[in-house]
Image (spheres, grey):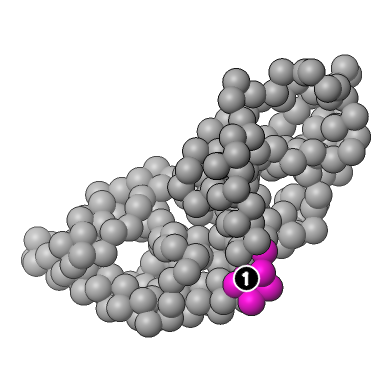
């Protein structure tokens, strides 16, 4: 989803995901995001973070911008906010919010009582420090397990929290592993140019769940590599 906000007179706007999701699970470095913040300030540009995918606990922080400490002028939220019910939200700094007056058109339909009640409950849960600590701990366990089975194959693992990507040399190989994983009853996604295996389990996933998933993915990876070696021979 790409939300366009009409910036104050004299300003431009720029969107960035602090951790790219569809782009290939690419975390923005602190140095890059700091430089982007500095450049936006110099040019009068509103810095907008799209945290639809990487926000609300996915990174192990409530919001992914906290990893770098770079504060955006606007931040978009959506899908996970209401636990599956349709919702979208935008957070604004005081400077940007002051440009909006009561009666300005902001949404065709928004703020429905049922959806907002769900969003309030979800926000209470994912902002709990113990919940976020579990995301970080389980995410570290997942990443370490992936590195254990992927490093010997020369495959890079990147990401943070429970948004992890495995980089394959080709989209064909990545797709083959995805299909083999499905045969093992493990559903994973692809991203980037199709060569990134994107792993984004539910934030309530346990370490036991992770261990089972790693076992199934290891079998899928092995079957694809064995087949590739056989074809090469």
At 78% across and 44% down in the image, what residue appears? 72
Other-residue count near label 1 (Cα within 10 Å), few / some / many at <14 / 14–19 / ≥20: many
The boundaries of the magenta stretch are 127-132
| Residue 60 vertical position relative to residue 38 in the rendered view, above or below | below
Q: Which residue is mark 1?
A: 132
Q: Is residue 129 left or right of residue 177?
A: right
Residue 83: % across, % down: 50, 52
At 49% across and 65% down in the image, what residue appears? 203
Residue 58 magenta-highlighted: no
Quadrant, the C terminus: bottom left
Front in this rendered view, residue 151 or 128: 128
Residue 64 in sight here: no
Residue 134: % across, % down: 57, 76
Quadrant housing residue 215: bottom left
Front in this rendered view, residue 187 or 94: 94
At 9% across and 67% down in the image, what residue appears? 230
């Amino acid at each position: 989803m790409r939300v366009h906000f009409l910036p104050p007179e004299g300003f431009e706007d720029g969107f960035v995901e602090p951790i790219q999701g569809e782009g290939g699970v690419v975390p923005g470095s602190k140095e890059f995001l700091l430089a982007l913040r500095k450049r936006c300030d110099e040019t009068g540009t509103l810095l907008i973070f799209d945290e639809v995918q990487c926000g609300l606990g996915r990174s192990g922080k409530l919001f992914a911008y906290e990893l770098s400490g770079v504060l955006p002028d606007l931040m978009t939220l959506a899908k996970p906010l209401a636990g599956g019910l349709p919702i979208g939200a935008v957070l604004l700094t005081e400077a940007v919010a002051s440009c909006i007056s009561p009666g300005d058109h902001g949404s065709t339909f928004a703020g429905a009582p049922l959806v907002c009640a769900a969003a309030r409950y979800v926000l209470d849960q994912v902002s709990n420090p113990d919940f976020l600590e579990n995301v970080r701990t389980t995410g570290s366990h997942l990443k370490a397990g992936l590195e254990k089975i992927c490093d010997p194959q020369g495959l890079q693992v990147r990401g943070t929290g429970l948004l992890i990507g495995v980089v394959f040399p080709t989209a064909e190989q990545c797709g083959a592993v995805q299909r083999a994983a499905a045969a093992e009853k493990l559903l994973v996604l692809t991203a980037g140019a199709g060569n990134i295996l994107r792993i984004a389990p539910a934030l309530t996933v346990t370490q036991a769940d992770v261990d089972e998933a790693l076992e199934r993915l290891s079998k899928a990876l092995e079957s694809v590599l064995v087949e590739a070696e056989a074809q090469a021979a």
